[in-house]
Structure formats: C-alpha cells, structure tokens
Amino acid sequence: MSERTPNFPFLSRPVSRRIAAIGMLGLAASLAACGGSDGSNNNAGATATLAVLETTDLHFNVRSYDYFKLAEDKSYGFERTATLVRAARKEFANTLLVDNGDTIQGTALADYEATISPIPCTQQLSMYKAMGALGFDAGTLGNHEFNYGLPFLNQVLGGGLDVEGVDATKKCAGAGFPVVLANVVSNKTKKPLVQPYTLLERTLVAKATDGKEVKLPIKIGVIGFTTPGIMNWDKRYLEGKVSTEGAVEAATKYVPELRAKGADIVVALLHGGLDGAAYSPTMENPGLHLSKVAGIDAMVMGHQHGVFPDTAAKPGFNLPGVDHKAGTVNGVPAVMASSWGKALGVVQLALQWDGAKWTVNKSASKSELRNIQSKNAAGANVYVDADPAVAPLIEPQHQAAIQYVKTPIGQTDFRMSTLFADVGDPGAIQIVNQAQQAYVAAYIQANLPQYAQLPVLSVSAPFKSGFQGGADYTDVAVGPLAINNAADLYLYPNTVYAVKVNGGDIKNWLEAAAKRFNQIDPAKTTEQQLISSFPGYNFDMFTTADVQYEIDVTQPVGSRIKKLSYLGKPIDEAQEFVIATNNYRATSGKSFIDKLDGSGTIWASPDANRDVVIEYIRKNPAVTRAANGAAKSWRFAKAAVAGPVVFSSGAKALSVAQAASLANVSLVAEDDGSGKGTSKYAIDLSK
Ligand code: MN
Ligand code: MG
C-alpha cells in the first residue's frame, strides 16, 4: 500500500480529514464517470490483487523463545512471521496486514509486563512494539485481551475505553494500529467498547486494461468480532461492565453501515473459528455463520489455533461449506493462521475496478498459509530466519522476563513429570491439586460461610501429555524450583474456579475424563493402544488419599469408574462437594457434566492457577515425593488381557515410571516409530 508508513503505523486518518477525503473521492469518481462516457479513461476494467496478511493468536510470542525451557524454539515466534510478512510485501504490490487477537497474553514476558513490572502508560507493550516494526493496518481483540482487566486493556490500547472502572480520558502509547471490535458493548455507554470497525483509505497499484500500471483509491472496511466466552472466562473483570452480541448480529448491523460509508470491500476479523453447530449468539466459533452475512469479502479466523486452508491429506474442519482447496468458507476467501506466529495467512483478493469502485471477484481469489517451518529435501525441519529488526526492540524486556522466570521459589527432591500421568503417576499433578485445594478452601472459610461445611477437593490434568511429541511433557528436574518450573507444572493461563457438585456428578465427571483411554478388549491377542485421541488436558484426576477409584478400560465410555470412595466409604451420590478446577472446565465443560456450563460455579477466582501453584510452592518450598507426588487416587481395574496393551511416552523414561512405583510398566521399544521422539511402553493390567 502506498500510504503505509511502516515505522509509525497510525494509519486511521482523523475524522475530519476522512470526511474531506471521502468528499474528494466522490468528486473524483463523478469526474471519472463523465470522462468515461465520452471515451476518455476512467480506468474501468482495471484489476488489482490485494493480499490480506493475517497473524492470529500470537500470544505475546515476540521471540522464538520458550520461557519455560529458557531456550530458543524456532518453531514459533513473531520475529519469524515478520520475515514472511516482508516477503509477501515484496511479492504483492498491495498488502493489508491485520492481527486477529489473543495478542497480549501468553508468555512470561506478557505476565511480566502486565503484572510483575507493569509497563508504563508511555510505553507500548513489547508485543505491540514488535508489531510496529512491521506496521499493522488493523487488528481485533481476542478473548485473552481481557485477561488482565479493562483498565490494563484501556492503557495498552492507548485509552478511550468508556466503561465502568476505567478512566476513559487516560492517553497512553497504544497498540500502534486501529483496533476494531463490533460485538462487545460498554454497559455504561451502550456503545461498542472500542470502535466496531475502521475504514482505511489506501491507494492500490492496479493494472489497466492496456496493461499499464495505474494507481487507484480504495476504501477498505475492517470489522472485528471476539468470542462471547469472555463473559465467563473473565467474568470477574467484565460482569456488569460489558456485554457481548453474536458476531452475526453485530455484522448484520455494521457491515451495511461500512458499505454505506463507501467501503469497497469489507474484511472481517473473527477471533473465532469453525464449528458445525447451529448458530447461537453466544457460540464460540461462528465462522460458518458469519461468512453468510452479506457484504463480507474476506474473513480471517483464529482462536482455535487451527489451520485453514489445510493442505494435509486429512484436513480439519471437515464441515459443509468449508472448502480447503478453494480456501473459502461458504464461498468467502478465508484463513486461520495457526497460533504463536507459526504461520502467516495470505488471502489474495482479486479486485476489479468499474471506474468508480472496487468489487471482489471471489472465485478468482485464493487463500493459503505460509509456515515458518518446513521440511528440507532430507526431511529435516527448516525454519525461516528471524527478522533481525524485531529482537533488539524488546531485548531489555526479554531479559527482564528471563530473570523473572528464573527466580527460585523452592526445591524438589523428585523429578516431577507427566511422562506417566496417563498410567497413574501423580508426580506433576498432585502439587497443582494441593495448591488449588488449599486456595479454594481458605477462600471459602473466609468468605463463603454457606459452603464452609462442604469438603473441598481438587482436580487437574496432565496438560502436557505428548501431543506434540516426546518433549511435550511437564518434566521438572530434581533441585531448585523456579517460576518457570511452576509454569511448566501449570501450562495454561487459566484461573481457579470452584464448582459445587454432588457425588453422582463426581462419578460422571471422572467417567468423561476416562475417555482418555480406548476400550481394551481382554480377548484380543494383538497389540492394543491404551491412549485415545481424547486430549490429555481433559484427563481430570484427583490426587488425594481421600478419594479413591479404579478405571476399568475394558468397559465402554461411561461405565469405567469403579469402587469410587470418599474417606474410605462408597461415595454418597447426594453428598455435596466443592471441586477446585479452572475457568475453562467450569464454564465450558458441559460435555463432562451439565454443571460445568458455569451453573455450578460458586466462585470465579481472580487468580491464575499457575500463580496459585507458585504461591503454594513459596509457602511450602521443600517439595518431596512423599508429600507432593505420591498420592494416587486411581489405578486401572485389574484385567487379564491376552495381548499387549501399549502407549507412547517420552524416550527412555522407564526410570521415571519406576520412581513412581508403577511396577506394571515396561519398555517395549525405544523408538515407537511415530517420528515424534517417543518410546513405546506396555502396561500389564493384570497387576
Ligand atoms: Mn488463542
Ligand atoms: Mg482465543
């Protein structure tokens, strides 16, 4: 875009200038129309390609750096996506760079700048500073933009959020690009919390019918939508202050408004993705429905951290209307560019000029993802280089964040890992449950007398359980425990929630969690895989002597939890309990039990589970296997199986199973053949 100013991308013109510009353009268009009628050139028939470039779910990964491992990881990071952006700008004369949200949260650096050493009003967040090196044209807000509360969001967006509890007159450094969001409304003003859309005026380099290059004006409407789940996930910050609308309702209201203001094309930034369910205004991923709103020419998606279009043999989002080959959703060119800067979405919009305005030729448009990681001829992973301009911009903050996560808070006498959590090692989960239980119990005693008589229990899950390969396990070495270790023990930036359930609910909750296992046929003499595709982070478990149960994997889903007891007696289905868990499970865990739709929540705490773990370790700095890693609430029900029952875990880790007293686990093959750096183990269910 000829008007882009890469190093200082405050691109929206002041309103007065914009109105003037619209007037001038209108004049130009009418003159051109006159000219055209007598044969002179209004350039009707000219064509141009506008490449819409998308980043999404960057989650504050400026650098290709893992703050938990304190090591470079080239498989993600905006510093590499930036290289793809620069390449695309060389390739295409006209580009529009947009960010789709979940931008300001997700790394230790994000936490550092939000809570540990809050970034001053005068400075941009490091993420925005890095993005400024590339010059974004517009962006929207993801759900995670709300994680640090509205005053912080107001500050980092530069001010102007007119909402209860926020000083709307505060002026700060800001994002550096216009941020748009159409479906979150301030209850105070009944107006959108931030501008619902922006109308960008640009000049396109186009090709006239005679093949010559011509420059022609365009008005690009950019509108944004976030997922209504924010009202649950950040209830403590948002309840009573803002409200959400459905993306379809908001689009139906504002897209025509954008068109009326002269938008030639409209690009929708949806911080949400694709889901085949019927539309509802609170649905998390309404892309299929939003794509059908008239007047949307391109749609960039996110939130699901998925990829679209997907060139894999068996692509995801296998839904009616989703066309991976064409790169369209119900005919609308679309992308979803993974997460953490792993890919850049590129929508090439084919534009046609009729002498006065542009239209999109959707069938001539195309979408693709460009990845920072690829394979070379030898099959090894190769990565695009980091843009050298990015890292220096944030170096002092990056180093400060590293110092922050290295801060020692305790020590452990055992290797705390999830390598064998699937088969019964509570070594990395028990301390999370202990921390959550203590935190919720203390709060209830102090603040919620109506629940003070109920037992408080806790569930957690092996968040890192090998999905990404042999290194994707929580694995904390014997020795000092630092903040980065605690973050490894609790991977996600969830917050602690407490739900009230009864004994029957607990059984059903555990039944749902036990979907982690395939049904094992005892008669089968050939090898059977124990672990299903049900994610490890959903394998909720207790880790306390007070709750005991068996998981019978020879039984179908729903009939696997046996001998469930509390304090040594069969659990009373009617007895009430408080369970400490996290915001995601408590509000979007309806597939576990109905009460996990938010209705069972008795306390939505303001604190991150990770911080609760960190505080627990600060108070109990001598972490031991005996006290913090040996309480097995469950075991597999004994079963004689004719053939081997196998599973994969990290390479050469049998000693970890042995240290956890899992005598029924054995190593089958050092390389399980998956190419993911994992070994094959067997479990003898008869023991
Ligand atoms: Mn995200
Ligand atoms: Mg999201």
Image (tube, rainbow, N blue to C red):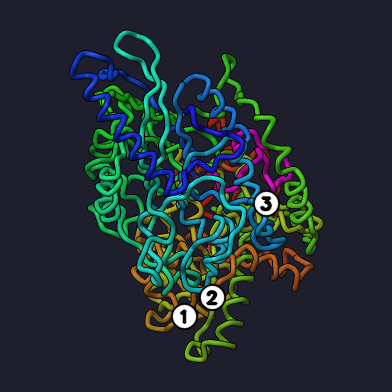
355 horizontally vs 58: left or right = left
Question: Could you say where residue 290 lies in the image, as x and y percent from the top left?
Answer: 28, 46
Of the numbered discs 1 and 3, the one sitting upstream in the chain is: 3
Residue where numbered disc 3 is placed: 109
Question: Could you say where residue 172 lies in the image, as x and y percent from the top left?
Answer: 61, 57
Residues marked 1 and 3 touching at CB (< 8 Å):
no
Residue where numbered disc 1 is placed: 577
Numbered disc in front, either 3 or 2: 3
Of the numbered discs 3 and 2, the one sitting upstream in the chain is: 3
Q: Which residues are magenta?
A: 57-78
Residue 576 in view in this figure: yes
Question: Could you say where residue 58 lies in the image, as x and y percent from the top left?
Answer: 54, 44
Q: What residue type is disc 3 on? A: Leu
Residues marked 3 and 2 touching at CB (< 8 Å):
no
Residue at image point 52% right, 91% down? 449
User: At numbered mark 1, what does the secondary structure look like: helix, strand or loop?
Assistant: strand
Question: Picture quarter containing residue 469?
Answer: top right
